[in-house]
């Protein structure tokens, strides 16, 4: 087999490096926005297409499930065939799928189009991070860039409900997908002009068995979570799902440990710092997505707020995430991941505890304070989690490094949506506040889990990177 080598990419000027970061952030804004913009429009979509809450969950989770399943393979493809090339293909697929979503005549077509959106988005998230990592060779500058990248991603996740509410106030639910067109066009143009091509020095083999098993595992887990309230958690169908998930997980570990170039090397998870970062990514996105979905259903169904008002209520969350994420990146660059993770865990825990006794008459100021606390915690969490994973692998595998934490985030998103939907499925609007209380306990528990992850983290991010590099 002939090995293809590539020249070392020249160091770009400071202006060019930060321009590349801006272009990558634009794509990340789009991915994050489409993860949550649909949440606030679920009641309108359900009314327009005549579907119930369980079908609405699949409209959200079809996107996050496919996205989570393909992220690592997309990162490996980008390292092999060129990051800018895969990035632009992802933009094109995402744009085409968005048009299909906007034109969908039924819930089934919409779910399929959302899955196709997930295919395109899988080529954006890890690849954008890989481009940033390879553009920023200085560790401190890279930590700051990741902080900004995380703040844009956090802003997009939190801004989704506000944007969706505004579009629904003036147009209809199909506008939630039409809005992607101008962003896609701008990102394609800017990436062609400013983003340099890069790839790994040595092409890695594609791991088809690992990809199939990972997709099967995620699909079964999320499917059981969504359908569990309907079929019963102890029903024969549920037990088939449990056994299927266990078999898929065992097979995945067995296959990956025997491959010379695995999709996801299980040995990485033997390092407490790295595995803690992945668990932290799952936890923070469970908390965020449970918050956004429970907020949408509670404010619109129980308190009869308009979609726009329900979206505006999440502004404290968006502001907290946007302000604290770059601050967290600077903290990681100076002192390591522990302090921002401690702050993240504390604020998320406080936000969840604020709403564990939610009622239909809960004071709006308490609601806004809880959303602000969760947003602040979300902002502080992303940079240390991402930086730990990226420092754990060499720059040549930056696409895979970013994909591992991105997969954990999307898995957390799918689990959060499934858990929140399971709590309120078939619940009368007057009882929704009480039914959602366990969800807020879960949000607080995710904050406690972040505190444990902070305890596992090293004092210095650089030390974390060295220890993980030795594991390789």
Image (spheres, grey):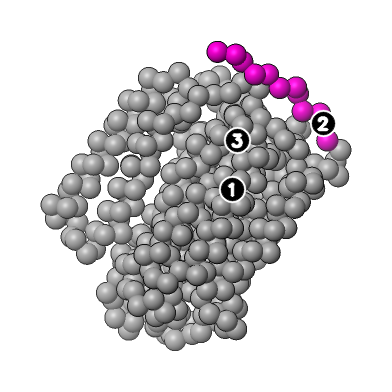
463 relative position to 136: left or right: left
Q: Residue at x 55, y 64 (%)?
A: 99
Q: Earlier in the sequence, mark 3 or mark 1?
A: 3
- Farthest left residue in view: 236
Q: Are marks 3 and 1 in contact (CB under 8 Å)?
A: no
Q: Are marks 3 and 2 in contact (CB under 8 Å)?
A: no
Q: Residue at x 58, y 23 (%)?
A: 203
**Up/down of 465 relative to 405, above or below:** above
Q: Earlier in the sequence, mark 3 or mark 2?
A: 2
Picture coordinates of residue 343 (x, y %)? 58, 52
Give the extent of the magenta segment: 1-12
Q: Residue at x 17, y 53 (%)?
A: 237
Q: Main secondary structure of the magenta part?
A: loop
Residue behind mark 1: 90
Tell me where residue 365 sits by quadrant: bottom right
Residue behind mark 3: 78
Picture coordinates of residue 194 (x, y %)? 79, 45
Picture coordinates of residue 220 (x, y %)? 30, 47
**Disc assigned to residue 11:** 2
Asked whether 210 or 89 is in front, the reply is 89
Q: Residue at x 75, y 52 (%)?
A: 189
Circle 2 — which element?
loop
Circle 3 crowding by C-alpha within 10 Å: few under 14, some 14–19, many from 20? many
Circle 1 — which element?
helix
Q: Are marks 2 and 1 in contact (CB under 8 Å)?
A: no
Asked whether 116 or 465 is in front, the reply is 116
**Disc assigned to residue 268:** none
Task: Compute the Cα span from label 3 to label 2.
Answer: 20 Å
Task: Compute the Cα span from label 2 to label 1.
Answer: 26 Å
- Mark 3 vs mark 2, foreground winner is 3
Tell me where residue 279 sits by quadrant: top left
């Amino acid at each position: 087999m002939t090995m293809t080598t590539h020249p070392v990419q020249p160091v770009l000027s400071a202006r060019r490096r930060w321009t590349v970061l801006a272009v990558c952030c634009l794509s990340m804004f789009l991915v994050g926005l489409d993860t949550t913009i649909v949440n606030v429009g679920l009641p309108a979509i359900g009314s327009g297409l005549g579907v119930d809450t369980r079908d609405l969950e699949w409209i959200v989770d079809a996107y996050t499930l496919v996205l989570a399943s393909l992220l690592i393979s997309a990162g490996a493809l980008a390292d092999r065939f060129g990051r800018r090339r895969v990035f632009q293909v992802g933009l094109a697929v995402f744009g085409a799928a968005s048009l299909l979503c906007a034109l969908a005549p039924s819930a089934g077509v919409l779910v399929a189009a959302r899955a196709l959106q997930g295919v395109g988005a899988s080529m954006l998230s890890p690849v954008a991070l890989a481009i940033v990592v390879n553009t920023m060779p200085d560790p401190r500058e890279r930590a700051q860039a990741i902080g900004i990248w995380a703040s844009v991603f956090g802003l997009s996740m939190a801004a989704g409900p506000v944007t969706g509410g505004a579009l629904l106030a003036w147009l209809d639910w199909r506008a939630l997908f039409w809005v992607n067109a101008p962003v896609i066009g701008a990102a394609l143009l800017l990436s062609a002009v400013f983003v340099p091509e890069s790839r790994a020095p040595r092409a890695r083999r594609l791991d088809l068995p690992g990809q199939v098993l990972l997709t099967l595992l995620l699909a079964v887990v999320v499917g059981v979570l969504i359908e569990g309230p309907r079929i019963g958690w102890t029903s024969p169908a549920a037990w088939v799902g449990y056994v299927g998930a266990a078999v898929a997980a065992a097979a995945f570990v067995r296959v990956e440990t025997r491959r010379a170039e695995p999709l996801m090397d299980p040995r990485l998870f033997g390092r407490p710092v790295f595995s803690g970062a992945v668990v932290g990514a799952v936890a923070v996105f469970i908390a965020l997505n449970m918050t956004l979905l429970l907020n949408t259903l509670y404010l619109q169904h129980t308190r009869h707020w308009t979609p726009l008002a329900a979206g505006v209520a999440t502004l404290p969350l968006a502001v907290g995430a946007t302000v604290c994420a770059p601050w967290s990146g600077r903290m990681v660059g100076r002192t390591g991941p522990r302090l921002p993770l401690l702050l993240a865990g504390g604020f998320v825990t406080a936000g969840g505890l604020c709403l564990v006794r939610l009622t239909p008459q809960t004071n709006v100021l308490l609601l806004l304070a809880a959303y602000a606390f969760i947003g602040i915690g979300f902002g502080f969490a992303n940079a240390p989690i991402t930086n730990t994973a990226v420092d754990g692998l060499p720059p040549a595998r930056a696409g895979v490094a970013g994909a591992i934490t991105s997969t954990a985030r999307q898995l957390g998103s799918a689990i959060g949506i499934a858990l929140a939907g399971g709590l309120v499925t078939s619940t009368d609007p007057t009882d929704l506040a009480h039914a959602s209380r366990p969800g807020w306990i879960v949000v607080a528990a995710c904050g406690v889990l972040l505190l444990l992850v902070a305890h596992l983290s090293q004092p210095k991010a650089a030390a974390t990177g060295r220890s993980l590099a030795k594991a390789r």
